[in-house]
Every structure is written in structure tokens, then in C-alpha cells.
Image (cartoon, rainbow, N blue to C red):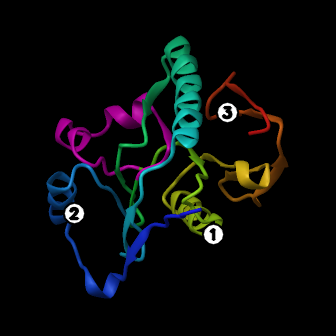
Amino acid sequence: MITYEPVIIDAKKVDLSDEQFYQLCNANETWRIEQSAKGELIIMPPIGAISGYREADLNADVVIWNRQTKLGKVFSSSTIFTLPRGGRRSPDVAWIANDRWAALTLEEQERFAPICPDFVIELRSRTDTLSQLQEKMQEYLASGLRLGWLINPQDQQVEIYRQNQPIEILLLPTNLSGEDVLPGFILELPIF
């Protein structure tokens, strides 16, 4: 079996401004590029079909809830956010409350928005290492994330991230609550 892992370019070798990073992504639009808070440039391999349909299902569940409540904006995995504490990250599913989104200028909304989502889901695919995703979740928390779920089908568990609280780990299958961040949202997670 061939496995593919992200290519990580050391921060000491690359120092990109916001504009340079934006231009790099636009010039290589078929690449999935992120930059960690440490400045590492991360070029990620494409995901397989299984991860693709799992991710689409998760996004659809959040979109359906949001269409009913109209409380915010939902973003796909192709959206890059410039996090306040560093890093340019692209969660698999992201949600931002309307008031926070409206506080951004139109120009900020059209580019890599300088905001951390209120809620994210990261879905571990076969190309992801758990430690890299856990580090990414910590970057979100340090930048103001209110609630995050790291879904790990390989180990049949989910890690729940909240501000100023220890990480909670649940075994699959389980139901996840959107708590006060996504009020009334319940996600039923099967065994993957």
C-alpha cells in the first residue's frame, strides 16, 4: 500500500507575507497549502474518496442546521483562515457566528479571512498524522476557537476541544452536541 504524507517545508527556509502566501496559493490553485503558526509551509496530498464523502456528510449536517437557525456562516475545507495567533489554516468544516463575520470588511471576507472560526471539525484521513492534527487544533484554540472536534476514524474516537478545558475523548459511535456554540446541533457519529 502506498501512503502519502504532507510535505512540510521548514519555516527557516520560507518567510512569506500575507500577500505572498495568497499569491502562492492562487498560483498553485490545485494544491492544498497551509502554513503553521511556527511558519512551516505544509503541502497536503489530496484525500481519498472515503475521506471525501465523510467530510461532505459532516459539512452537510452543519449546513442543514445553519440554514434552519441562520446563526452564522459555514465554510468548506477549501477555505483558508489567517489565524490571529499565527498560521494560515483550512479546517475540514468551519463555522463563524454572523456578528463576527459581519465585523470583517468585504476585502477581508474575499481573501483569507483574518479570523479564527468559532467551531471547526477536523477529520483524520489516511494521509494525516494524529499529532499534526492535534497541533492544528491547539493553534485554533490559541487563536480563539470556542469548540472543535477532531474525528479520528482510525482509532474510532473523537477529541473535543474547548477553551480553558482539558481535551475530552469519546469513543465511536457517539453523539456530539454543538453546546452553546451551535445551539441545538447534534451530530450522530457512526463507527466509520
Say if 73 sits above or below 135 in the image. Answer: above
Q: Which mark is residue 180?
A: 3
Q: CA distance from mark 3 to mark 2?
A: 34 Å
Who is closer to the viewer here, 166 or 192? Answer: 192
Q: Which residue is drawn at the image coordinates 25% and 80% (left, top)? A: 14
Local crowd at mark 1 within 10 Å, few (<14), some, or many (≥20)?
A: few
Give the residues in magenta.
90-115
Image position of 90 (left or right of 56): left
Instruction: Identify the mark nearer the N-term, 1 or 3.
Output: 1
Q: Earlier in the sequence, mark 3 or mark 2?
A: 2
Q: Secondary structure at mark 1?
A: helix
Amino acid of disc 2: Phe
From the viewer's perspective, is residue 177 above or below residue 129? above
Q: In the rendering, at what x and y percent does residue 9 appear?
A: 35, 78
Tag 3 near tag 2, CB within 8 Å: no
How crowded is the residue under tag 2: few (<14 C-alpha within 10 Å), some, or many (20+)? some
Q: Where does label 2 land, which residue?
A: 21
